[in-house]
Amino acid sequence: MPVSIVEVKTRKQLREFIYLPEKIHSNHKNWLPNIYVDEWKFFDPAKNHAFSHCLTMLYLAYRDNVLVGRIMGIIHNHYNAVKNEKTGRFGYIECYNDDEVAHLLLSSVEKWAYSFGMDKIIGPYGFSDKDPQGLQISGFEYMPILATAVNFPYMVEQLEKNGYEKDIDCYIHRLNLNQPFPEVYNRVMQRFESKNDFEFKEFKSKRELKPYVVPILRLVNEAYKDLYGFVPLTDIEMTEFANRYMDVLNPKLVKAIMKNNEVVAFIIGLQNFTPGVQKSKGHLFPFGVFYILQAMKKTKQMDLMLGAVKPNYQGLGFEILMAMKLIESCHKMGIYTMEIHLVLETNLKMLAELTKVGAERLKTFRVFKKAL
């Protein structure tokens, strides 16, 4: 049967776009659905400020009037202007193991991006590095975590058959928090305690944490500006990002270092609640919230989500100090495993530190590229 590619124009088509993955992954043991309340907000230009400075296109693929695939195209005008590039992006690609459907989805976005003068396309990649990036290419046996791709291995082959090649890899590592850590880490902590010009900040409540969220995200803009694919967050996007995670954030797993009332370093961990989202099938109601809270209460794993140090304070051991304080909090909460989230292969310093402490590499994710 012939395959037709259709642009998403109606709310009904958007619904099909959002809910297609649960059909494709219905027998996928390790699949982690997105939370649908968040999905509707993400794909709504009125609620997701990223649409305001990007060109976007959503496509659906039908075979004999049956929905069999989806893809999103993005041209990030601000990123291209800052980086002096003409790069398009594809993301949120889903289809069955059907090479024809994959080819038509990819070629549709390629032609769309080319029509706006783009000379390269990368993906899977969203509006920013805070969205799922890349396809998983190894470690399929391990439990997925929030904000990472969950795909079948055949999708990697589909991209390669369509002329895509590696652009960059990133990794997830697992760290045993019960192990002894290098003695130098203790010396770093003692050295910090002797300094009077810095303040180590911990939080007991979300009310106490809330005023620090935007300053923390402003530091992300400063510290991440040269990282692959990073686009500075606007104030509106900072608020949107904070609102997305505040409900599930435990203040005890957020650490910061202050100087003159300014955040100069921070680290954020998140109690793993993958089993709760899987049990809820992405729906918060009527019981999804309960499943997620129950999973957070029972978990023995913390996912390291975000961290940064102000550029002129890097190299002072702040990363080690915050990590050790975070591990202390984990021990008090009965958490003994940490997964470190999507470390770029170009982040040699971080990778060397993970090797030093015996972290196990679990999964590899790959962003692909193709010349247009």
Image (cartoon, rainbow, N blue to C red):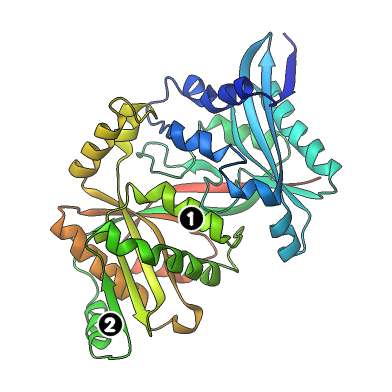
Residue 182 visible in rendering: yes
Tag of residue 188: 2
Residue type, mark 2 in image: Val
Above or below residue 205? Residue 17 is above
Label 2 environment density (alpha carbons within 10 Å; few <14, some 14–19, many ≥20): some
Q: Secondary structure at mark 1?
A: helix
- Asked if residue 360 lies left or right of residue 291, the reply is right
- Asked if residue 119 lies left or right of residue 354, the reply is right
Above or below residue 200? Residue 5 is above
Q: Which mark sits nearer the N-terminus, 1 or 2?
A: 2
- Identify the residue under disc 1: 239
Residue in view at x 21 percent, y 47 percent: 300
Q: Secondary structure at mark 2?
A: helix
Q: Residue 186: give x, y in percent of width and height.
A: 22, 79
- Asked if residue 263 lies left or right of residue 39, the reply is left
Q: Residue 175: give x, y in percent of width and height.
A: 29, 57
Above or below residue 210? Residue 158 is above
Tag of residue 24: none
Residue in view at x 24 percent, y 43 percent: 296
Q: Residue 255: give x, y in percent of width and height.
A: 30, 68
